[in-house]
Amino acid sequence: MKYLETLQLKKRLFLLFGFITVGLVILGLIGTVNLKRMKTQVDGLYFGSLVPVTELNNILYIYNASLSPTVYKAKYGLVSNDDVKSQIIVSLSQIKKIWNKYKRQYKTTEEMPYINYTSSEINHVNEYFYKVMLASKKNIDLRKLNISLLEKKVEHISLVVKKLLNYETDVAKMNRNEFRKNYLSTMKTETVLLILIILAILIVTYNIFQSIQKENKKLEFMAKKLQAANKKLESASYTDSLTGLFNRRYFNYIYDREVKRAKRAKKYISFMMIDIDYFKQYNDTYGHIAGDNTLKQVALSIRECFRRPSDFVFRLGGEEFGVLLFGVDEHNSAKLAKELCAKVKAKNIEHKNSKVADIVTVSVGVISCVADESLDEEILIKKADDMLYKAKENGRDQCVITTDVNNFHMTLNHSTSVA
Ligand code: GH3
Ligand code: MG
Ligand code: MG
């Protein structure tokens, strides 16, 4: 992948992470702000509306269940002055405590006028009960008390407190509605934002995958090209460029591998060394380019002779060739070597300065044996070379074969001259 393209991919990835981060931060901020707002509303709903409802009801209860009956009983002399006094003190201090608690709780500015009004009305009504209490303190006869005044006062305070109660209930309803509205709009905003973020992520991700796919295709194409180049290079590494035969390097590798294999399988193995006769003179007479062409022709003849998949034909160097045969006995090897000599001659390549013929000829040295564990792997090369030397010595244009894999020379009757 090119550097710039890698950079672009990185940029897109950063963009994706950027989108996600910014999106989450925005969502978090909106969520926090909205939650704070909702908490204030819930506070308003609970402390401003629900708790006050109980407190105001408690105040009303004290007026109706404690203060009024005390005054009523006092009118009819059912309780002593001391009891009246203590009961009124207890009730009033309870009302004061509850009212102060109520006032301390969360209040909106809109609520304050109602609260102040109710507060003054409570104080006003309480003054009446103070008066009754003071009278009881001074041991004044409480049977003279005006009950209808008490009833009026209690009725009035009930009305005022109920009004406040209604107001608080209305505020609670309003708060609840607003809370629901806020909750729904928050949910809507969060959902829209979430969808937008997911869409943005999808688009960027799609983009990234597209470019990855593009890069992948490019890589695949490059890999195929590389594979083809590798194949070419590989074949070049074991092929001789002039003749197209396997080269010396490949011979070393194949020789080692195949001889070992033949030894394990106890198979027939034949190795031939082929050398063009008086090739130096050929070059001197016809030049190097003609010499190269002749090398190609001889290589072709060798190839034509040895076509089996198990046959290996090498150019060992200069104008020297090697052939490895497997599963071919000495008779057939000698036959093939003779055929090769004949085939080269059949090409009829002029060589007027050859001392053996007026055409190009070759000499062949062959070793043929059954391979077994005792076979010295180097002996085949040495023996084939010896036989080639012999063929040259015997006058060239012939093949000499041996089956002797021992170190001393013993040429078989197979040593053959091909006329
Ligand atoms: P002999 O019959 O004893 O083999 O005689 P010869 O002249 O062929 O002797 P030798 O095998 O030593 O000769 C090798 C010559 O082969 C030397 C060189 O001129 C020639 N030769 C080696 N490699 C090449 C090549 O790649 N191209 C050409 N044109 N000639 C080569
Ligand atoms: Mg030579
Ligand atoms: Mg030669």
Image: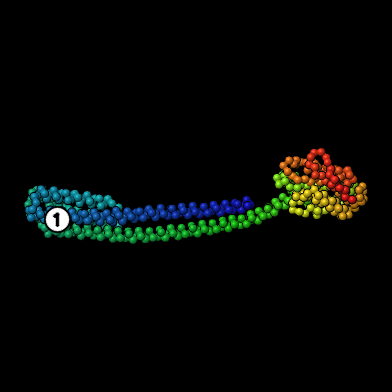
Residue 249: image x %, image y %?
75, 45
Q: Nearer the viewer, residue 214 or 10?
A: 214
Residue that appears at 86% across and 53% down:
342
Residue at the image position 80 percent from the left and 54 percent from the top: 304
| Helix, strand or loop status at disc 1 | helix
Toward the front, the furthest residue is 413
Q: Position of residue 261 (x, y in %)?
A: 71, 46
The x and y percentages for residue 40 are 34, 54
- Between residue 113 and residue 322, name the one nearer to us: 322
From the viewer's perspective, tell me whether residue 419 is left or right of residue 330.
Answer: right
Q: Nearer the viewer, residue 83 or 377?
A: 377
Judge whether residue 240 can be spotted in this image: no
Residue 333 or residue 128, whichever sits in front: 333
Report whether 365 appears left or right of 201: right
How packed mark 1 is, by other alpha carbons closer than 10 Å (few <14, some 14-19, many 20 or more), is: some
Query: At 84% from the left edge and 51% from the top edge, which residue is drawn?
Result: 338
Amino acid type at mark 1 = Ser
Q: Is residue 195 visible?
A: yes
Farthest top residue in view: 408
Q: Going 54% across and 53% down the picture, which residue do you hit?
A: 15
Total number of numbered discs in the rendering? 1
Q: Is mark 1 within 8 Å of ligand 1?
A: no
- Colouring mode (rainbow / by chain / secondary structure / one colour): rainbow
> Within the image, what quadrant is residue 391 found in?
top right
Q: Position of residue 188 (x, y in %)?
A: 42, 60
The residue labelled by disc 1 is: 68
